[in-house]
Amino acid sequence: MDSKLALYIVKRLTLAVITIFLIITITFFVMHEVPGGPFLSEKAPSAAVTAALEAKYGLDKPKSEQFVTYLKGIMKGDFGPSIKQRGRDVTTVIMKGFKVSFKLGGTAAVIALAIGIVLGSTAAIFHNRTIDKIIMVVTTGLVAMPSFIVATLLLLVFCVWMGIFPANGNEPGGLILPIISLSLYPMSYTTRLTRSSMLDVLSQDYIRTARAKGVLPVKVIFKHALRNALTPVLTYAGPMFAYIITGSLVVEKIFAVPGLGKEFVSSIINRDYTMIMGTTIFLGVLIVIMMLVTDILYKVFDPRVDLG
Amino acid sequence: MNKTDEMPKKNPLSFQLNLKDFEKATDEEKAQQVRMSESITFFKDGMRRLRKNKIAMTCLAILILITLIVTFVPMIYPYTYEQQLGVTQGKRIDKTYNNLKPFEYGETELERIANGEKIFPHIFGTDSAGRDYAIRVIYGARISLLVGFFAAIIVLIIGVVYGSIAGYFGGKTDLFLMRIVDIIYALPDMLIIILLSVVLKQVLGPKIDGTSFAKIGTDMISIFIVFALLYWVGMARLVRGQILSIKQNEYILAAKSVGSSPWRIIKKHLLPNSMSVIIISTALQIPSAIFTESYLSFLGLGVSIPMPSLGSLASDALTGIYSYPYRLIIPAIAIWLIVLSFNLLGDGLRDAFDPKLKK
């Protein structure tokens, strides 16, 4: 590894650490700005009860002290107790939900990348032919659809009208529709990205040279073109994970998948403050790490890129 | 015309001027200098290319049509978005108005029709609270478009000012300003938006009660605040990059040497020359803001009840999806059409105005 790359990785790591710290700080202080504290509800508890509750959760101490305690907890992977779900702590809830969400999101990401790359390359190879035009029209249409629209329409068509798939994510086969709804947008985006990158590569001199030498067309595409065309697609991996993570919030809500997203949405509705904080920080850190890995991989794979 | 004979013969090695070069232009030569067509500015050239792009023009027409509909139809429409048709003062709630199918009427309306009165039909029926669904969709589209435009304007202003300062002054200022941008860029925007929406609803709610802001709703305001805080960084980066490259041109040096102030140089020379990039990016910012708003509304963090937005309409429709699927399909198509049109128009603008693609 050359020193320039190492320097870049150090720089990028520093930025990631700062970002993670900022996410925690923003989340903590913003959530603590809520007037009346987290225990304010319709059936107002008496002053003594509120005070006891606040003492129990350490809310009577100064904010800076609470922040340090919270930070220390996070370092140990402890997000504190859930306020609304009695007797459960946030970390357990997050981990339990994350297992389901990871399966859902990971599958969606793999499918999106695989199909997107195949479709994109196909469109580029058959540039301006019918198949290219069909792929472009469909993906243009899909890119304009928010994930929740895709999810609700799929629910309507396949569960309500046709009854092929269960509408509940708990049942066997129930994860198929959520996976499709999560992967359609990233798939379309990957397709368009691969297509334009592939078109760019296919017009390069070295492809013409390879063809002139009589290399088999299949080999030209797989060995010479696709390898080089995939580097820009790699940059999309980070934003794609961010999209899938935020998309899973609504998709899990729609299909009643017992994942982290559904947990997050219900904690918003229930105003479960420690849960909101914990989930935001967890997902935020996840996104930051994904972005970090993407950026570093990109520099490793494409040494031409200027290491700014 | 044949004057060459009168000329002294020129020694090919001498530096003597060739008098032939200094003759008066003939009429024929003058005619060549006459401009045959109007000179075309960059903007006109781009517009000409945009007009040739059929897809982009169709999208522009659709968007103009939608804008006209959402602006003027609520003025002449006989129902309002918050009016519960079954509720009249001093009477029991008439439940026949709830959940009407398209082109059905409530009980009292049927009586009035029987009496020969003409009643404007409920084109898309009514919702579970007896509100006319068509006007709610139209009003929802209005909210979505407004959010898109205002968010784009906020991003435009902050991004352009920030980016041009960083790009023009360069050096340490640039370094410092761009580090801030890097950090904001790395924050997961959607999560921060959700977080701020949750909290601002509580914090702002009591403060703006009774003012005109209350009508807009805390969630809308928090969307705008978040856009102002987070979304401008993309635009700032773009503008800075443009300004950095345009700054190298000689005319900027010339402007500096005659003593133009930095602000004047930015305003008169740098920004007009990066206009195409700014326009394209703004056009693409609008659909992304509409996306964000509908997403938040869907999570229940969007506009305040009873105000509809396309996202909240789709969200509400989920509960009755088995009986009233059209209530989901209509706002879904509306969002899709608006976002698709903006996307394609943005692509068209890029093709028309991006000098790099110019043939």
Image (tube, coloured by chain):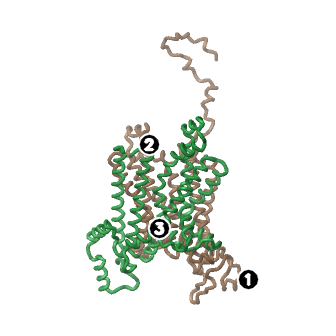
Chain colours: A green, B brown
Q: Nearer the viewer, residue B89 or A219?
A: A219
Q: Chain of mark 3?
A: A
Mark 1 vs mark 3: in front:
3
Q: Residues within 10 Å of mark 3 (few under 14, many from 20)?
A: many
- What amino acid is at disc 1? Gly
Q: Is residue B200 visible?
A: no
Determine whether, in the image, residue B266 is placed left or right of residue A154: left
Q: Please give the residue where the numbered disc 2 appears in the rendered image.
A: A304
Q: Chain of mark 2?
A: A
Q: Secondary structure at mark 3?
A: helix
Instruction: Check chain identity for marks 2 and 1: say if they share one.
Output: no
Inter-mark Cα distance, 2 to 1: 79 Å
Inter-mark Cα distance, 1 to 3: 59 Å
- The answer to whether the residue labelled 2 contacts the one labelled 1, judged by CB atoms less than 8 Å apart, is no
Residue B55 locus on image (x, y percent): 63, 53
Inter-mark Cα distance, 3 to 2: 36 Å
Rendered residue at 45%/73% (across/down): A263
Q: Earlier in the sequence, mark 3 or mark 2?
A: 3
- What amino acid is at disc 2? Arg
- What amino acid is at disc 3? Ser
Rendered residue at 63%/36% (across/down): B36
Q: Please give the residue where the numbered disc 1 appears in the rendered image.
A: B116
Mark 2 vs mark 1: in front:
2
- The answer to whether the residue labelled 1 contacts the one labelled 3, judged by CB atoms less than 8 Å apart, is no
Q: Please give the residue where the numbered disc 3 appears in the rendered image.
A: A101
